[in-house]
Image (tube, grey):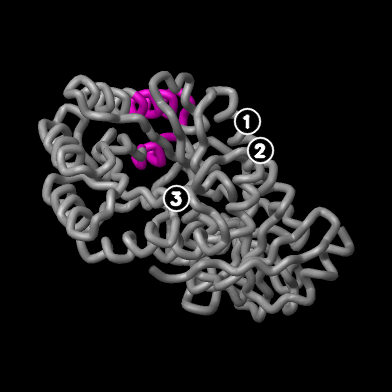
């Protein structure tokens, strides 16, 4: 531990830290669960946007990755990953980028949830003599986008793709509403709802003599809560690799599973208010207050000591652009300047790992023996 503390002392703050033993534990936990169900696991790498993290997931047994931007797809393909699902609805303006990646050899799949989009994909594909593989997005919970499993538009989209010579690769869904629950019973129920919706959509396509080889579902809460995956061929999840305070409140991890933290330094005090001021504001933590409407509000993050041990009652309670306010819940700590002198280094656990990671161009990955590796992170679109 002393070696780790000495190594951390050399880093400029704020800095994004990955606790490698925790990350590896999270990866193995999810992969073992998917292996036990006998389904493929395609992690969503938008959480880390980092090649070494994705490679660790693949080394554990994942098959392919999911991305949220075409820049991610391009970079991960350059890093040697070929099986990629771009899980954001396709627009005509992005099809030339998809074409270029496929022509370079990337096995890039795209998604749609409308007849208009399907027709645009087919028209461009035929014009360019390219057969795109397209999955249909299913709305399993009214959370965001997709076609309801019983909607007539599902078959219209399927016919528009298959009839024009495109590859109808399957169906996919994401139970984003799972973040709103926090009991095992509720999470099991939303996981089953997700499964049933996607499987039903696949059955409708097949009954209409349309191909549907892939049935892809997933979110971190449902992947870790599902009791059965009958009819599912693959699962996707992302934030599990780091976890965060929102997932802690949902109930699928403990605070000691959270592998991402922000290293920060105390730069001053407002003693009469019981505040310590740190150099990690919302530009480091992000403005995501995902725990605000949950059963436990962690402000802008949970404060830990340099060893990563939680300091009960101390939160990052406020944030300006480059300044964070560290305070104690309840009675103000008027001895805070003694508790956290100027120069003290601390770690802050984030509300939302994806949003906090996005604030940094790189991670500092900390191994069990104290070695620190710097890993680049993909930025932009």
Q: Earlier in the sequence, mark 3 or mark 2?
A: 2
Query: How far is the residue under mark 2 from the one under mark 1?
Result: 6 Å
Residue 199 in the image, given as x and y percentages of width and height:
32, 24
> Disc count in the image?
3
| Segment tinted magenta in the rendering | 175-195
Q: Is residue 178 magenta?
A: yes
How crowded pointer 2 is (Cα within 10 Å; few <14, some 14-19, many 20+) is rated as some
What residue did someone put label 3 on? Answer: 84
When the figure is inspected, residue 228 is found, relative to residue 211, above or below; the finding is: above
Which numbered disc, 3 or 1, marks the residue closer to the eye? 3
What residue did someone put label 2 on? Answer: 28
Query: How far is the residue under mark 3 from the one under mark 1?
Result: 22 Å
Classify residue 179 as left or right of residue 278: left
Quick one: SS at disc 1? helix
How crowded pointer 3 is (Cα within 10 Å; few <14, some 14-19, many 20+) is rated as many
Q: Residue at left 65%, top 45%?
A: 59
Q: Earlier in the sequence, mark 3 or mark 1?
A: 1
Q: Residue at left 79%, top 73%?
A: 9
């Amino acid at each position: 531990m002393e070696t780790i503390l000495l190594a951390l002392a050399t880093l400029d703050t704020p800095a994004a830290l990955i606790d490698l033993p925790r990350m590896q534990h999270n990866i193995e936990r999810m992969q073992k669960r998917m292996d036990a169900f006998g389904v493929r696991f395609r992690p969503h790498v938008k959480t880390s946007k980092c090649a070494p993290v994705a490679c660790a997931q693949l080394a554990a047994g994942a098959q392919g990755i999911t991305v949220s931007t075409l820049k991610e797809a391009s970079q991960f393909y350059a890093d040697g990953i070929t099986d990629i699902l771009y899980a954001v609805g396709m627009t005509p303006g992005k099809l030339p980028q998809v074409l270029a990646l496929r022509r370079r050899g990337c096995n890039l799949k795209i998604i749609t949830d409308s007849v208009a989009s399907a027709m645009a994909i087919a028209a461009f594909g035929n014009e360019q003599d390219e057969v795109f593989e397209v999955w249909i997005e299913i709305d399993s919970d009214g959370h965001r986008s997709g076609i309801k499993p019983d909607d007539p538009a599902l078959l219209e989209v399927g016919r528009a793709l298959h009839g024009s010579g495109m590859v109808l690769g399957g169906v996919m869904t994401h139970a984003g509403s799972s973040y709103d629950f926090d009991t095992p019973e509720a999470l099991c129920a939303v996981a089953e709802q997700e499964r049933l919706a996607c499987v039903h959509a696949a059955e409708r396509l097949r009954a209409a003599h349309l191909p549907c080889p892939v049935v892809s579902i997933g979110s971190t809460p449902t992947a870790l809560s599902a009791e059965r995956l009958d009819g599912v061929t693959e699962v996707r999840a992302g934030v599990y690799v780091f976890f965060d305070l929102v997932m802690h409140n949902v109930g699928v991890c403990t605070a000691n599973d959270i592998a991402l933290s922000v290293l920060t330094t105390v730069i001053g005090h407002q003693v009469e208010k019981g505040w310590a001021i740190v150099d990690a504001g919302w530009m480091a933590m992000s403005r995501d207050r995902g725990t605000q409407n949950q059963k436990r509000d962690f402000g802008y993050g949970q404060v830990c000591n340099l060893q990563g041990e939680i300091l009960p009652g101390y939160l990052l309670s406020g944030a300006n652009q480059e300044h964070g306010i560290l305070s104690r819940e309840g009675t103000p700590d008027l001895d805070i300047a003694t508790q956290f002198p100027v120069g003290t280094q601390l770690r802050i656990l984030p509300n939302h790992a994806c949003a906090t990671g996005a604030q940094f161009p790189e991670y500092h990955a900390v191994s069990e023996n104290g070695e620190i590796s710097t890993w680049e992170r993909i930025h932009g679109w």
